[in-house]
Amino acid sequence: MDGSLSRMRGKADFRLMRELLGLPQEWVAKRVGVDARTVRNWESPRYFYPPKREAWDLVEGLWRRADAK
């Protein structure tokens, strides 16, 4: 995996990283204290709100860990 992807900050980038890591929306939602619908909204171009910082920290941390292997 390319560590440079962790520097991306768009909604589509969040979704791509989550999917490449094999993380279900429900799993991410539970870990950051929101419901799965919120994660779907974060990833949708139809909604304004981006993923919250805790979600980015979670996904990027797992990405870096996977990239280090």
Image (cartoon, rainbow, N blue to C red):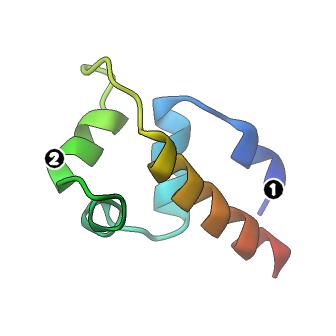
Q: Is residue 64 left or right of residue 13?
A: right
Q: Is residue 62 left or right of residue 36?
A: right
Mark 2: amino acid: Arg
Q: Is residue 59 above or below residue 46?
A: below
Q: Which sits earlier in the primary sequence, circle 1 or circle 2?
A: 1
- The residue nearer to you, when weighing 32 against 36, is 32
Q: Is residue 66 left or right of residue 10?
A: right
- Dividing the picture into quarters, in which one does residue 41 lie? top left
Q: Is residue 48 above or below residue 22?
A: above
Q: What distance separates the C-alpha of mark 1 from that of mark 2?
A: 29 Å
* Residue 59 image position (x, y, % from top left): 55, 58
Q: Is residue 28 above or below residue 6?
A: below
Mark 1: amino acid: Asp
- Describe the element under mark 2 as helix, strand or loop: helix
- Dividing the picture into quarters, in which one does residue 23 lie? bottom left
Residue extending furthest bottom? 69
Label placed on residue 37: 2
Which residue is painted at 73% across and 73% down in the image? 65
Mark in front: 1 vs 2: 2
Label placed on residue 55: none
Crowding at dot 2, Cα within 10 Å, few <14 / some 14-19 / many 20+, comes out as few
Label placed on residue 2: 1
- Dividing the picture into quarters, in which one does residue 33 lie? bottom left
Which residue is painted at 46% across and 59% down in the image? 19
- The residue nearer to you, when weighing 30 against 42, is 30
Which residue is painted at 62% across and 68% down in the image? 62
Which residue is painted at 31% across and 17% down in the image? 48
* Residue 40 image position (x, y, % from top left): 25, 43
Crowding at dot 1, Cα within 10 Å, few <14 / some 14-19 / many 20+, comes out as few
**Quadrant of the image containing the C terminus:** bottom right
